[in-house]
Every structure is written in C-alpha cells, then in structure tokens.
Image (cartoon, rainbow, N blue to C red):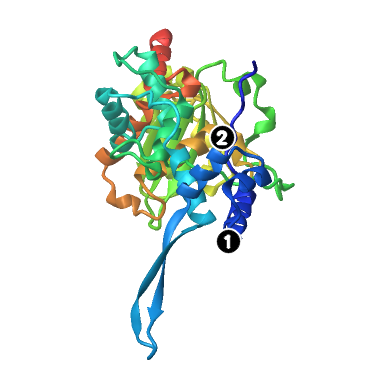
Amino acid sequence: MPRKKFHNLTWTQRLQIEAAVKLKTPVKKIAELIGVHQSTVYRELKRGRYVHRKKRYDFYGDVKGYRETERYSPDIAQQNAELNASSKGAPLKIGKDFAFAEYIEKQIVDEGMSPDVVLGYIRRNHLPFETSICRTTLYSYIEKGVFSRLSLTHLKEKGQKKKRKNRELHAAKPPRGTSIEQRPSEIWSRNIFGHWEMDCVCGPTREVLLVLTERQTRREIIMKMPDQCAASVVQCLNVLERKYGKLFRKIFRSITVDNGSEFSDYAGMERSVFGRGRAKRTTVYYCHPYRSCERGSNERMNREIRRKIPKGSDIGKFSDEDVRQVEAWLNGYPRRILGYASSEELFQERLAELA
C-alpha cells in the first residue's frame, strides 16, 4: 500500500476554517470543505486558538465584568506553524566539536580569513578535527547564528558584488611606453614566474603605497613613498634591484602598469642601477586606459589592503612596520586559487628554483 503524503495547510485553507468557525460549522463539515481529515482541523483549531475578552456592562453603563470566549485566528495559526517548522531539520553537523567551532571563529573574526579559506586550510594541512563540513554548510550556520562570536558582519565580501557596466572607451593618446598589446601571450597564461602588476594606493595626503603583485604566485610587495611622483617609483624599483641583485631580472621579468603620471618614466623604471651602460633590467607594459581588469590581480590585492588600511586613511600615519605587517598578512593568507597555499610559500619555492 503506498505511503500517504502529508501536506501543511495553506493560508487559504486557514481563512476557510476561520469563516466556517464563525458560522458554527461542525468540524466534520469543515474537514470535508477543505479536503482534510477532521483530526487535522482539531489540531489546527488548537494551533490558532486564543482567548477573546469582551467587556460586560450593567444597566447604568458601568463595566460589570468580562466575557471570555475561545476563538480561532488564522494569523496565530500561521505564525505557530512557521515557528514549529523552523525548529525542524537535521541536527547540526558541527555537534559538540567545540575546538572546531572555536578555530573557525578565531580564523575568521581575529585573523580576517574567509569561511572558504578556513575550511580549505584545514583540509590542506590535515588539522585533526572530528568534524568536516562544506563551505555552503558553514555559510548557512553563520547566517543562522550558530556561532557565539561569528556573524555576517565579519564576512567582508558578503553581498557586495556590483553590477558591471560595459563601456566602450578609447584612448586619447598613445601609451608612454610599450603597450600591453605587445605583451607576450605567455604572460597572460601565468605559467611563467616573474611577471608583475604595479599600482599605487593613495590617501588624502601626499604619502602613498607602491604595490606590486606577482601574477603567478600573487606575492605582494608594498612600499611607502613620500609622494606619487615618477622619481619615487623609480627609486623604489632601485631599492628592489639592490636587494635582489642579479636575480632581479629573473624575478621581475616584466611589470604591467596603468597610464598614471607616476609611471610616466618608463625608461627610468626599465634601466638598471648597475653597470656603466645602465642595461635594461625589466620590461614595462602599459594597460589600456580605464581597463583596470588588465591588472586584475593587482586590483584584487588592493581591496585586501583596504581591509587593513581603509580608504581615506592618512597613509603617513602608518609606520614602515605597519606596512610590513600588512604585507606579511597578505602573503601568508591561504588562497583557494593557489590550492590553499599562501603566496609566500610559492614565492619562496620559485626563488629556490632560480637560485
């Protein structure tokens, strides 16, 4: 015999019950009217029952007392039905694994990780927790308020996607140096290490941050500059070349920039500080105007920097040590696109291969 299917009463059926009760229709007739068993009607009347109190007056119009009668409210019945339904469902997978819950809270609330990155890091490093949940389940638990400290306010990217506008914009003048159109296809594929994107993160004062992002490993270099001038950019690259020495040309094979005035001295950026002839140390490519997507990795990392140095902050108030801490946080952050490895891990592996 096939198993009988049970369905919840609809709002229309509840309105029909209310109307029938006011007409003092027998329960059996109400059940036939809405097509359910009479026991369902009895349970529904109990679910939506409330006490209606009406004043009683004497001959002189004074309140003599109250008359209380039981009535049925479809609104109350609906609310109680929804409340009961919300308490149903499978038990939480996280159970009593308090160590697992505390670890997730610490990494997201205190360390600024995303839920996906936390779970990926746990799997990659085989951390010994009793519980294993997927990303969707974790987001669901956060929305339901399962955690004591963790809420949706700690998810920086939640619900912040913006609708893209497709605009056809044309350059008013040619790039100052080599156009990105001449950049080899191997750079687009990210299969070769040593190709960077560069930009500036600005504030309301003269001080700015020069930000370089390696396309393959997503390794980040952040340097403070006294101003947003071309000479300051060249000086920062000179510092990096002196730091890495002969390996500079292999580590910084190319740098892609926008058409900002701070990157106008392409000859100075490409020219080495070593040797009399000032040999070429790297190749600088210029993006098309208004095409920040051509430096996508760089733009993405700039958003992460803004989590530590909010937009509108005076960059001059951040010390060199503060900037180094932001850089270390970014480079130590596990990333899904890197198999939940960190940029620093992969960057050091590439440096070892070059050495």
**Compared to 135, does 163 lie above or below?**
below
Residue visible at 61% across and 35% down in the picture:
294
Estimate the x, y position of residue 350 in percent, counting from the top left. Answer: 43, 13
Please name which of the two marks, 2 or 1, marks the residue nearer to the observer: 1
Label 2 close to label 1 by CB (< 8 Å)? no
Q: Is residue 273 visible in this depiction of the protein?
A: no
Q: Depth check: 28 or 253 in front? A: 28
**Compared to 196, does 29 lie above or below?**
below
Estimate the x, y position of residue 308 in percent, counting from the top left. Answer: 35, 43
- Dot 1: element: helix
Residue visible at 40% across and 58% down in the picture:
204
Q: Depth check: 89 or 325 in front? A: 89
Label placed on residue 22: 1
In the rendered picture of this protein, how many numbered marks are placed on residues? Answer: 2
The amino acid on which the numbered mark 2 sits, given as a three-letter code, is Gly
**Compared to 130, does 5 lie above or below?**
below
Q: Find the distance from the CA under tag 2 to the CA under tag 1.
A: 67 Å
Residue visible at 36% across and 49% down in the picture:
226
**Compared to 106, does 258 lie above or below?**
below
Mark 2: few, some, or many residues within 10 Å (few <14, many ≥20)?
some
Label placed on residue 92: none
Q: Is residue 213 visible in this depiction of the protein?
A: yes
Q: Depth check: 224 or 339 in front? A: 339
Q: Depth check: 144 or 109 in front? A: 144
The amino acid on which the numbered mark 1 sits, given as a three-letter code, is Lys
Q: Quadrant of residue 178?
A: top right
Estimate the x, y position of residue 72 in percent, counting from the top left. Answer: 50, 56
Label placed on residue 296: 2
Is 158 displayed left or right of 288 in the figure?
A: left
**Which sits earlier in the primary sequence, circle 2 or circle 1?**
1
Is 278 displayed left or right of 316 in the figure?
A: right
Quadrant of the drawing holding the C terminus? top left
